[in-house]
Each structure stands twice: as C-alpha cells, then as structure tokens.
Amino acid sequence: MDIWDKGKRFLIETSFLARIKKSQRLFLGTGLFIIIYLLLLFSILPLGVSVELGMPSPQRIFAHREVIDTFSTNKLREEAATAVLEVFDHVPTILEEGKASLSRFFMEIKRVKALENDENAEKIALLKETLEVKVPEDTIDALLNQSQDGLNELQARLERIFEEIMSKGIKQEGLQIALRQVFQEINLMPFSPEIKQGMEKLLTPLIQPNMIYNAEATEANREAARQAVEPVRILKKSLIVQEGEKITEKHIAQLEALGLLGPRIHRGGYAGLFFILLIVFIIVILYLYLFNRDIYDSFTHLSLLGLIILLTLVFGLATRFFSGYLMPVAMGGILITVLFEPRLAVLVNIILALLLGFVIDGEFCFIIVSLLSGLVAIYSVSRLQRRSDLTKAGLYVAGVNIATIIALFLLTRSFQLEYEFLREFSIAVLAGLGNGLFSAVMAIGLLLYLESAFGLTTAITLLELADPGRPLLRKLLIETPGTYHHSIVVGNLAEAAAEAVRADPLLSRVAAFYHDIGKTKRPYFFVENQFTGDNPHNKISPNLSALIIRSHVKDGVELARGEKLPLPIVEIIQQHHGTSLISFFYRQAVDNGKGIVVPEEEFRYEGPLPQTKEAAIILLADAVEAAVRSLSRPASGRVEGMVRRIIKEKLNDGQLDEAPLTLKDLDKIGDTFVHILSGVFHQRIEYPERELRADLERGKKNAGDGK
C-alpha cells in the first residue's frame, strides 16, 4: 500500500509539473506572438488617413516608404508625348503629276496656236474641248495672243511657283494658306489680269496636300517619349501634405500609391498578418517538438530563442530606415548557432528573412541578401574553434553581401554611369558591408550577456576554459603534474570519441581537463602524483583510503562551483565516476577482513550515473587511460584487450544505464580509444644499459691506466 501511494503521488507530481511546463510554454509563446505581431503590424500596415478632395488636410502626412508618384509621372509623360511632333508621310507623286499637267496644258496651247488656217474663235473652241483644266475664254484668248517667248516665260514661272510651294510640303490644314501664297505669286507676274485669273484656275486643282498624317508612327514616337521619362519617386519621410493644406487630386493619388488612403483600420491586413505569423509559429513549434525536444521542454531555452528572434526583428526594423541591405539577419543566425545548433539556426534564418521581407514590402533583392547572409553566418560559426571565428564570420557575410548585391544589380538593371545609379549602388554596397560587420559585432557583444543571463555554455566559453593559464588548470599543472598529464590524455580520448558518436567534442575535451581538479586537495594520495615512491595509503585503512579517493569528486565539484565553471562541466565532474567500485581498496578490505562481509556501497562513488554522452565518454576514457598506463608492456593487442574489457565491465556494472549511448556507439568509442592509446603508449626500444655502463667503466679504467 505504501508503494502504491508513492507511485500515485509520483504520477500526480509528474502530471502537475507537466501542466506547469505546458502553461509556461503557452504563456511564453502567446506573449512572443503578440509582441512580434504588433511589431510587424505597425511596420507593414501603416494606419490610413481620412481626407476629402478640396477639403483641408487634418494632419501632416509623410511617406512611410519609397513609392512611384504615378500622378506626377503620368503628367510628365503626357507632357513629353504632347511635345512630340506629328509624323507626316511625303507623297512625291503629286508634284510630278502637277508638273506633267502644266506641261500638257502649255503644249496644247502652243499646238493650237500654231494652226494657221483656223481663226481665234475656232482655236478657242478647240482648246475648250481639249484642255484638261477648264479656264475662262478670256484667258485662252489672251494666251493665244501671247508670243512664243511669253508662253515659255509664263510656263516657267508657273512651274517654279508650283514646285516651290509643293516642295515645302502641304498638310491638309495648310492647303488654303498654300493657295493664298500661290495666288500672291501669280498676281506679281507681269501678265494681263485675264492670264493671271486663268493661271489661278489652272493651279488650284493641282495644289493638293502632299504631307499625309501617319497616326501609327506618331503614336509610337509619343509612346517612346513617355517611356523615356523616369518615374517620379516619393522618397521615404518626404512630406506629402501639410496640416490644413487643401487636398488636390495629386495628394489623393500620392496617398493611394502609399496605401495611406482609406479607413484607419485595415481588417484584411490584420487578419492576413495574423494567419501568416500563426503558420510560422506552428512550423517552429513542430520543428522543436520533433527535432529539438530538449529546447522544447526547456522554458529557459525557449525564452532565449524568442529573445534572439525578437532582438533580430527589432534591429531589422531599426536599420531598414537606412537600407534594406543593412538588416542584420546574420546576427540571429550566429547567436542561434552558437547558443543552440546550426539546423535550428537555418530554419529561423529563413523565417526572419521572410518576416523582414514583409517589412520592406516584399523587396526581392533585400530578401535574397538577408537569406544568404544568414546562411553564410551559420556555416561560418557551425564549427567554432576560437573567438576570432566570429569576426571572420562577419567578414564572410560582408563579402557575400557585396557579391550578391552586385549580382542583383546586374540582374535587375543595366549598369549605368549616372549619378543616381552610382549613388544607389554605392549605398547598397556599403550597407551590405556594414551588415556583416554590424552582425558580428552585435553577436559578440550579446553572447556574453545572453550566456550569463540564461546559464548556457557556448563554444566561446569552453575555448576560454581550455586555456592552460586558467587558475584551476594552472593549479592542476603545478600541484598535480601527473593528474594534469592524465587529464590531457583523457581530453584527447574524449574529444575523438565524441566526434565518432556525434557528441560535443569541445565540451568533452574541456570537461576532461577539469574532471580531476578535486585531486589538488590531496595530490599525493593519487598514484600518478607519487614521485618519491612513498605511498600514504600504506599507513591508513582501506576504508579511509576509499573515502579520500572518493572525496576528490566532491572536492572537484566545490572547486568548479567556486570558480563558476559552467553547469555541464560541473555535472560531468560529478558524474565522471558514476557509482563505480573502488576495486583496489575494496579487495584490500576484503582480504584484511578475513571473512567479514564488506559492503560494496562503502567503496563506491556517490554518483550520479552519467546522464549525457559526454559524461559517459569521460568516465570510460578516465578508466581506460589509467588501466592502459598501468600495463608493463603496452603492446597493441594488450591495449585493445584492456580497452574492450574496461568498457564491458562498466557496461555490466550499470554505469552506462542512464547515458544515451548504444552498443554501436560503445564499439566506435572502443575503436577510437584503441587507435589513440596505441600511439600514446607504443613500445619503446630497450636500450642496453648494462652494456653501455660496462663500456663506460672500461673507458674510465683504461684512461686511469694511461692506455
């Protein structure tokens, strides 16, 4: 009944804790959703203004983004089209036909005039029938009375007048003006009024428009003129209308282009943004639940992830007023990669690039640069080895940004040596350069505070802790040089094994450096530090010896906490022996007990068992290194046999029961240990010391005898 009550109480407490965690996640997710939603809302959907044509504006209105001023652009384009002259096609046949008609007229006059038997009346009657152009009888009579030279001069003058007027080109609307000019020229000729009147009758039907309007060519030229006009842009923060200024059609068109005209509440926009952000949150939550369960179950980790996303969005919203190329999406990628892991950083990078793309009206170029810069930043710090790698990541991001911006400019527009193009191009390149440097600087600055505030251990911290000049490592080297050397070898073993089973190599190596720092309290009680041959354990009981040996774990935890080492390292120090049996002193106690039952619990470490891959690897590396070092002849076969035996013993003893290692992982760890230890403890050449000493003695003797 007591066991049943305990089990029931455990289930109640477990479910209660689960409900608390669930409510914490719900509260955090809801709060983060609301904050991001409001941030994006005020950036994407600016509040509209209510204005009426012809009425004074209720407020000063500024442009919140850069758009094309369609009203001014269309006005300038129509003005350019109107300034284009109409296109007319010249018809040369009208001139040729007119000259031919004049020539036939005078030829007929001259032919009839040359008839000798006919009277003038008969000639006039004949000409009235044969002439193509009808002229008065008085004109015909006057022409017949003209001399041959007079007719030739008249013909020449008429042809000259006709050719001059037709060569200038006559449009339909200019026909009457051309006729008046011809009549004026005719009136100035030195001939009789009857002839002048007849010549007016003769030329009137010949003067015709020879410039025909070409509607298609004219419209094509006007369209080309319209397209040649550069669009007028409304720049960000430019004043659209003053408070109290009368609203014109131009103001209405500009407000419509900016999306500011209309009611103050854009319900459709609110709902659209809400559902887009909801989809994004669901995707992230599912990813964390399926692939990063440790982050999903940790309120601290979720809070940190949300804070990084929020900071990146805030910086992005702030920098977009300078340039969309300056938005530091790479900063979020660096922070998430260093504080969490690269795959999650890739997902968040894509989401941040798209969300900030909404802020800049879906500008394709800005989204591409943000996406690529974030990916480059993630790849650059995915295998962080030193703090300078963060600076290099900023340079890599800057370089990729510049290359991408140049490529996008070549893709979207032709290169021009014009001031506006060069100015825009220069600003974009400088913004891309600043993006990389700003992202790296902010990431370096924020890492220290985020790491400290949320209690996380990053690669940067581990790299700093691996410095041999750190107080604890220096203390370990000076006071316990044997333990220091042992820790270095264990670190190498642990790092290689961690790489083989996809654990954290850097954490494994650094934790191995510190796993035995507790031995600095009583260094000479550990065999690797006994250089004089005097073993203090010979003077005390096995129980006390086991207690001293066991206490180095507790002492190490106290030292680590005193130096404020990260929690993962403290936990590995605490777990690196698990509940292993201190077998040497246990057997000694059994031998000394002479049949008395000796409880194993008194000779076991207090634990707990290793909870992580890294802790389990260090437990195995620690035991294996000590065992192999004790071999008198560390041949390759003996090293492998010892390694396999130690791993099997730890497995059978239950020391790996709570560690997430498979049998396949243990096999890989064993292979790695054998490979490294075979190189460290290889067989040496045994030098013939006796023969060498004998030769030296003989040399001294011969020298003393004078030989």
Image: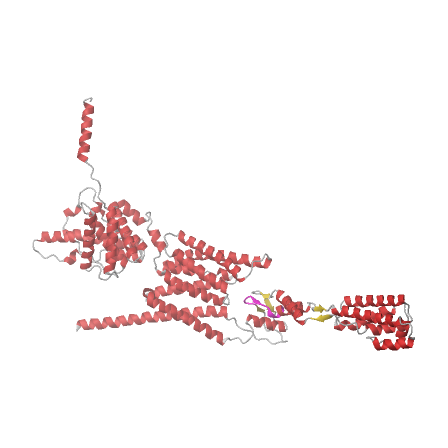
Q: How is the image coloured?
A: secondary structure
Q: Position of residue 87 (x, y in %)?
A: 69, 68
Please state the total of marks drawn on the protein image.
0
Visible residue check, residue 249: yes
Q: Nearer the viewer, residue 379 or 654?
A: 379
The outermost residue toward the front is 117
Q: Is residue 632 part of the magenta span, yes or no?
A: no
The residue closer to the viewer here, 211 or 571, is 211
Give the farthest residue toward the top: 706
Taking the view exactly as shown, the residue that stands out farthest to the left is 595
The percent coordinates of residue 100 (x first, y second) are: 79, 69
The reply to whether the magenta stretch includes residue 67 is yes
As drawn, 421 above or below 130:
above
Locate residue 300 relative to residue 373 in the image: left or right.
left
Q: What range of the chain is rendered magenta?
A: 63-72
Nearer-the-camera pick, 60 or 121: 121
Q: What residue is shown at x 81% (from left), y 73% (from top)?
A: 204
Image: 379 above or below 171: above
- Residue 256: name its quadrant: bottom right
Horizontal side, residue 32 vs residue 195: left or right:
left
Instruction: Pinpoint residue 364: horizontal percent, then vertical percent.
Output: 49, 65
Q: Quadrant location of the C terminus?
A: top left
Q: Can the viewer see residue 548 in this picture? A: no
Indicate the quadrant containing the N terminus: top left, top right, bottom left or bottom right: bottom left
Residue 252: image location, x then y, percent: 60, 73
461 vs 647, nearest the viewer: 647
